[in-house]
Image (cartoon, grey):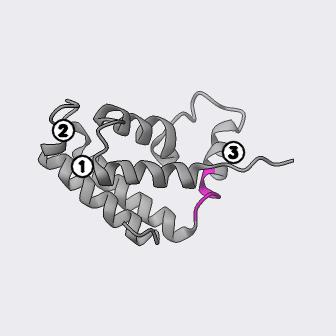
Amino acid sequence: MIQRLYYNESIRKLLECIARLDTIIGPTEMICMWYDDLYFPCQNDKELYNDGVWERGQKEWRECFSNIELDVLANFHESYEKYVDYLSEDPNTFMNDPNWKKMQIAAQRALREMGDKF
């Protein structure tokens, strides 16, 4: 039996957190979740897995999304890449950080383009 992967739902939830600048999750976790846990195309662990595991993981991840969603996520990732080094990780003040505000707008746009009402 093939298990269903929930990357689509998980990424949408993370985008919602970024779109709200969720203070419960906080800035550091929102950054780490995107880069370390959910957006597989930015991960480059191919050297660690020479038995096809990395390629299979990338393929299975992509199968969780439509082509339109993959394009939207790639565009969002470009914004993240542009601002990530300048994002405040202070949980008390990140909501006022102008770069987080740009990420908030990018997340809202991504959700709308993926068909979510936000």
Q: Give the Cα distance between marks 1 and 2.
A: 17 Å
Q: Amino acid at mark 1?
A: Lys
Query: Residue at coordinates 54% horizontally, 33% vertically from top-left?
Result: 45
Q: Amino acid at mark 3?
A: Arg
Task: Give whichever of 12, 63 is nearer the camera.
Answer: 12
Which one is earlier in the sequence, the residue at label 2 or at label 3?
3
> In the depicted view, which residue is nearer to us: 39 or 13?
13
How far apart in space, not on screen, are marks 2 and 3 (Cα)?
A: 36 Å
Where is residue 39? Give x, y as percent. Answer: 48, 46
| Apparent side of residue 14 relative to residue 24 in the rendered image (left or right) | right
Disc number for residue 94: 2
Magenta-colored stretch includes residue 63: yes
Query: SS at mark 3?
Result: helix
Residue for point 56% across, 55% down: 8
Marker disc for residue 56 = 3
Residue behind mark 1: 82
What element does badge 1 sit on?
helix
